[in-house]
Amino acid sequence: MVDKERQIIHMDQDAFFVSVELRKNPDLIGKPVIVGGSSDRGVVTSCSYEARKFGVHAAMPGRMAKQLCPQAIFVRGNMDDYSKASHEITEIIAGRVPLFEKASIDEHFIDMTGMDRFFGCMKFASELRQTILKEMGLPISFGLSVNKTVSKIVTNECKPNGEREIPFPEVRPFLNPLAVHKIPGIGDATYKKLSEMGVRKIQTLAEIPQDLMFKILGQHGLGLSLKANGIDLSPVVPYRERKSIGTQTTFESDSMDISKMKAILTGMVTNLTFDLRSQQKLTSCITVTIRYSNFETVTQQARIPYTALDSFLIDKAHDLFKKLYTKRMLLRLIGVKLSHLVSGFEQIGLYHTSEEEYDLYQAMDKVRNHYGVESVVKACIVKPPQKDENDKVIKYNPRKKKGKIKIEEENEEDKTRKKSRIRTFINSDLGTATKLDG
Ligand SMILES: [Mg+2]
């Protein structure tokens, strides 16, 4: 369907984490409040509009925020509270609209296309906003326009406590004077490149020929060019079709070895959370599945605060496994799935975790990004070292090993077999959706 005929609402809580803190502690209202970043190495995850006046913004190092705004009140933050509020907001929206997408912990897209014949979209959105404001006691803004990109820009422009409609004929005049960095998804590198080209306003970007944009920035450049022209055909992905990532393992021979199961679960969760973080997603639901040797399959699920960190999810997976594995019977399969995914990144720094742990994950992810997902693993999932006939550990010999790896690489069949042992899959219906809207 062409954009001209679409009606897309983007709803976004204002300074979400801070607003939840203010609701808890009204003494903080009107003061420069910063969630996260209280320690030297921490990062600001959310800040009040009073703090923003001093130049403080999300993702800024806490130390810099302190310099800009010495009187700021730092709050550690509580992901459980934010997750709870997030689910409640989603429930309110789910009860009132037929088609919506949860884009992040505090953002929803609603597709109202076709509904304007029954009631005005602006009136509907405005009432929905008032309902959320009243029931949640948390400030919220929305933009209504022809697609997800434009609606999101509209919201950002009318924040805080704002609402605005930009109908199709006004899209280009609305976008033209805005700075290019207002287009969602423009990273620092792209922004720098565009600045070097002298491109500051969206209008200038919109006027650059598409093939030139493609030459300079590839596929991404083409997408940007469309967005600058107010075109975005991406659909609102229904929340019902929940996005998920999962992995499962069928054992070569059925097993009852509990410590082995736990180690496998640990390995699977570690791989999944790495995927999650590299897609900049958070999960709020974990599912563990086991299949007994007689093919009886049982599943347990748990709702959790939004997270992308290993330690909590590993404990949860072990808990669920303990609840599931009630029969003294051999197992043939074990699987883990993380679902209810939303976009989010800085938030993982807020989770109940020590700074050291957070730094460790970042460092491990860096190594994995360079050398592959199996380059760093937890000690408990590593096979015990090979021993010779005298029970002596065979020492690692890099030269010998090199030769061996080469042979393995040449054997395609071995390679596929190895791969299929731990099979990571992305929810087939939404395979692309999970990756697309990061
Ligand atoms: Mg927000």
Image: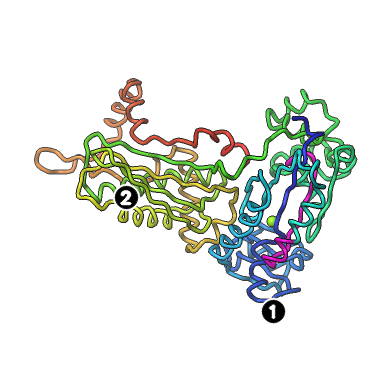
State which quarter of the image contains the C terminus: top right
**118 or 233, nearer to the observer:** 118
Q: Quadrant of residue 424?
A: top left
250 vs 357: above or below = above
Instruction: State the residue position of label 2.
Output: 379
The outermost residue toward the front is 118
- The numbered mark, 1 or 2, whose residue comes first in the sequence reads 1
Residue at coordinates 70% horizontally, 58% vertically from top-left? Answer: 13
40 vs 406: above or below = below
In magenta stretch: residue 133: yes
Real-space Cα distance between discs 1 and 2? 47 Å
Instruction: State the residue position of label 1.
Output: 27
The outermost residue toward the left is 390
SS category of the residue bearing label 2: helix
Residue 244 circle label: none
Residue at coordinates 35% horizontally, 49% vertically from top-left? Answer: 266
Q: Position of residue 1 (x, y in %)?
A: 74, 30
302 sits left or right of 39 in the view: left
Amino acid bearing label 1? Asp
SS category of the residue bearing label 1: helix
Q: Position of residue 149 (x, y in %)?
A: 74, 41
Amino acid bearing label 2? Ala
Quarter of the rendered structure image containing ligand 1: bottom right
**68 or 204, nearer to the observer:** 204
5 sits left or right of 294 in the view: right
In magenta stretch: residue 219: no
Tally of numbered tags: 2
124 sits left or right of 256 in the view: right
Residue at coordinates 70% horizontally, 72% vertically from top-left? Answer: 72
Look at the image and give the residue range highlighted in magenta: 131-149
